[in-house]
Amino acid sequence: NAGVMQNPRHLVRRRGQEARLRCSPMKGHSHVYWYRQLPEEGLKFMVYLQKENIIDESGMPKERFSAEFPKEGPSILRIQQVVRGDSAAYFCASSPRSDGNQPQHFGDGTRLSIL
Amino acid sequence: AQSVTQPDIHITVSEGASLELRCNYSYGATPYLFWYVQSPGQGLQLLLKYFSGDTLVQGIKGFEAEFKRSQSSFNLRKPSVHWSDAAEYFCAVGADSWGKLQFGAGTQVVVTP
């Protein structure tokens, strides 16, 4: 059973470029969560998606960040016009249901570095 | 507002010694509580969870945690640590019915010979 797959594992971008981070949830999971981990900090919730729907994006910065989870294919976290402060590890997690008591399964993350 | 506090940023423990990691939460209702472990360069692995019932929960890798409502705590323990337990440990609370998690800042555990 494949776990949550994130790619790329490492991504380097120059300021002003776009970053696209991909997440394939575990088989049978239709709920995806994105978190960001800044250096020396815990994970911070960004966005929660179900297939084709954004349910909660209260943790997303208002500008430059967007997320989608299409009917087919992985979930995508997109960061436009990246800045140095976007350097972080971005983690995706999935669960089979959205119950608050459902443990989330995490991918290994994408480490984004901005030059 | 909900919050999760891990008072200890860094703990050093000798191999074979016991380990206790503290976690305090602030939450209006009975929380869903989790402990995750993160090895360098890896994602988070679930150690254990508490939803209801028995306040002492057993997890993987020999870890256990005790929910104490009166103290708003959910401390993680292991009787005898192994060198492979060196990692960062995160306490988390289920912050709403959608399941999104609110994490503490983490505790880095170093195991010495």
Image: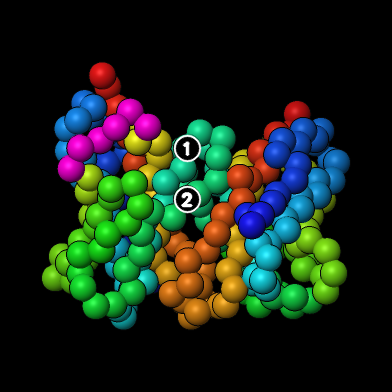
Question: Residue at coordinates 22% horizontally, 48% vertically from top-left?
Answer: B77
- Relative image position of residue A106 (x, y in whole percent): 57, 54
Q: Which residue is mark 1?
A: B39
Predominant SS along the magenta part: loop
Question: Residue at coordinates 52% horizontally, 63% vertically from top-left?
Answer: A104
At label 2, which amino acid type do we have?
Answer: Gln
Q: Closest to the observer: A72 or B10?
A: A72
- Quadrant of residue B23 within the rendered picture: bottom left
- Relative image position of residue A113 (x, y in whole percent): 70, 34
Q: What mark, if any, has residue B45 been given in the picture? A: 2
At label 1, which amino acid type do we have?
Answer: Ser
Q: Image height check: is B112 above or below A51?
A: above
**Residue that sits furthest to the front in the current view:** A1
- Quadrant of residue B72 within the rendered picture: bottom left
User: Which of the marked residues, 2 or 1, is nearer the chain's N terminus?
Assistant: 1
Question: Residue at coordinates 36% horizontally, 59% vertically from top-left?
Answer: B48
- Marks 2/1 in contact by CB < 8 Å: the verdict is yes
Q: Image height check: is B111 above or below A101?
A: above
**Residue that sits furthest to the top in the current view:** B113
Crowdedness of circle 1 by 10 Å Cα count: few (<14), some, many (20+)? some
Q: Is residue B80 shown in magenta?
A: yes
Distance, label 2 to label 1, CA atoms, is 9 Å
